[in-house]
Image: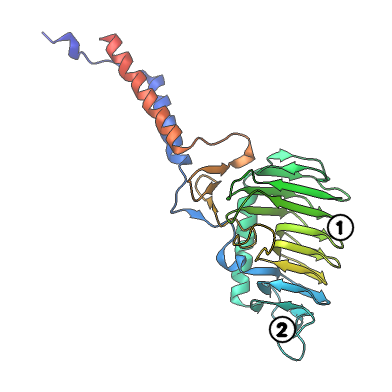
Amino acid sequence: MRNPIFRPIPFPRRTARLVAMVSFAALLYNPSPVLAVPILGPELASFAVLGASAVTNTGPTTLSGNLGVSNNSSPTGITGFFGTLANDGPGTYTGTAHQGDAFATLADSQLVAAKTNLGLLGPGTILGADLVGLTLTPGVYTVPAGVSNLTGALTLDGLGNANAFWLFQMDTLITSPASVVNVINTGTGAGVFWNVASSATLDTTTDFEGNILALASITMNNGVTLDCGRALAHTGAVTMINDTISLGCTGTGEEGSNGLSGIGLSYDTIGKVVVDTTTGKVVSTPGNVVSVPEPGTLLLLSSGLAGIIFWRKKETV
């Protein structure tokens, strides 16, 4: 006679399905270091300014980083930075000029990838058209089109996180004269991205921060300062007048951040999430609404389910 203690116990189908779903979720949302990529590719990250059709400048604009056009190899593709000698003004730059070469073309392909990946993070929190007066903690935000998207000061507060991440999904990006973006309480790994679906215009004496990734063109009027970031346009031109663009972020508190490119962050191509590369923690999820559990949380949940199943077996015996 078979000992009843060792009687086979049917495994409930519902429980089996639940365990399978949790296990699959653990695999799906565990950030994969192998498939994680920088938000800005290395060639793209080297540019302070990258246009497509042209880059034009008037006056003593200064750039810290590379200068280039991705879709115009003619000598007139970049104007206002070359005279009788290379880089002899009136505009100056510290890096290398690329005019429609393979390096600039590769950087543009990385711009397309960055815009696509950032777009997959969803709308996040929907704000009003004008960001004036707000203090925003790290996250994903959607800003609708308006006459001006910034008529005064905006503060981005990293809450002490050196790898803070901000993403703004924009139809257009327009600032009023003398507008200001302040980034505070963060560090060298932080990232600020303005993902613009058309064109961007920074009006006179605007003091801005972050990476402008525009589908079409970027216009910077007289005396604009992009303290810590880049002007990157995929299909159109970048136009400047007596402006300053810096990847060095001198005096902003984000020195070493490489232009707020998010060097402490990476984009995971499997989970479609942004990950803090120091902690492995997911910092932004698709839609920025439902937080993806950390791998440890999922493992604890799986262990708990296994314990419940074992307990049910003992009770049945």
Total marks in image = 2
Instruction: Residue type at mark 1: give it.
Output: Ala
10 Å neighbourhood of mark 1: few (<14), some, or many (≥20)? some
Residue 17 vs residue 157: left or right?
A: left
Residue 207 vs residue 7: left or right?
A: right
- Chosen colour scheme: rainbow
Whether 169 is drawn above or below 9: the answer is below
Q: Which residue is mark 1?
A: 178
Q: Position of residue 133 (x, y in %)?
A: 82, 44
Label 2: element kind = loop
Residue 1 vs residue 45: left or right?
A: left
Q: Position of residue 162 (x, y in %)?
A: 58, 50
Residue 42 in view of the camera: yes
Residue 172 vs residue 116: left or right?
A: right
Whether 231 is drawn above or below 132: the answer is below
Quadrant of the rendered image containing residue 284: top right
